[in-house]
Amino acid sequence: MNDKHVLFAALTCAASITGAQATETVAPGLWSEQVSHSMDQGHTWRARPPVKHCVSAQQAATPSERLRELIEAEGCSTDGVSVAKGRIEGVVVCTSHGGARIKLSGQYSDTRYNVTGDATGQAEVNGQVIDMPLRIQSRWTGQRVGACS
């Protein structure tokens, strides 16, 4: 699944997944997000450059639709994802991507988040799953940095 969209989508679905109060959503505006990965049990982290994007009021108001689109487009589904009271936990399961299971854990507010993911599955080369277990740890951080221009 596209790294820059997984966590934003999960966080924006807070009210719809858990039945939480409507105040547990993200704020519309300009967001800066960064993804880091480790393939050696967290000893070495490789960060991608931060990405900025705008979240419209409509996207913030209909978070479950955006989440569903992003997850289904990647051949994935959620398994017991809970986003409530400033915490996110659960698993994203993908039939594609070598059968990846991504365990999510972290904290969020309406203006920032810090979430880690522990993905396990089989390696995939040129669309073919090969007999090689794979484990990747990821960190997603983001914060609202202002209004969209």
Image (cartoon, helix red, strand yellow):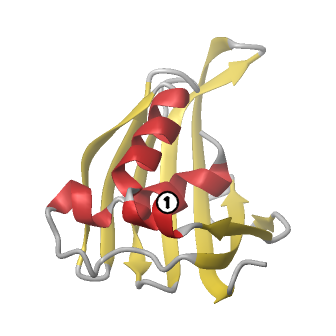
Q: Nearer the viewer, residue 106 or 143?
A: 143
Task: Specify whether 130 is left or right of 86.
Answer: right
Task: Specify whether 112 is left or right of 39.
Answer: left
Question: Does the image show residue 43?
Answer: no
Question: Which quadrant of the rendered structure holds the N terminus?
Answer: top right
Provide residue 18's location: percent of width, then percent of height. 17, 61
Q: Nearer the viewer, residue 98 or 18?
A: 18
Q: Which residue corresponds to the image point at 39% horizontal and 45% vertical from the top-left?
A: 65
Q: Nearer the viewer, residue 3 or 102?
A: 3
Image height of 5 relative to 74, above or below: below
SS for tag 1?
A: helix
Q: In the rendered picture of this protein, how many numbered marks are placed on residues? A: 1
Tell me the amino acid under the disc marked 1: Gln
Provide residue 5's location: percent of width, then percent of height. 60, 53
Q: Which residue corresponds to the image point at 57% horizontal and 44% vertical from the top-left?
A: 135
Question: Which quadrant of the rendered structure holds the C terminus?
Answer: bottom right
Quarter of the image where one finds residue 128: top right
Provide residue 2's location: percent of width, then percent of height. 65, 44
Task: Specify whether 124 is left or right of 99.
Answer: right
Q: Residue furthest top?
A: 128
Q: Residue furthest right?
A: 49
Q: Which residue is mark 1?
A: 59
Provide residue 98's location: percent of width, then percent of height. 56, 23
Task: Specify whether 85 is left or right of 48.
Answer: left
Label 1 neighbour load within 10 Å: few <14, some 14-19, many 20+: some
Q: Which residue corresponds to the image point at 40% horizontal and 40% vertical from the top-left?
A: 68
Image height of 81 relative to 65, above or below: below
Image height of 146 relative to 27, above or below: below
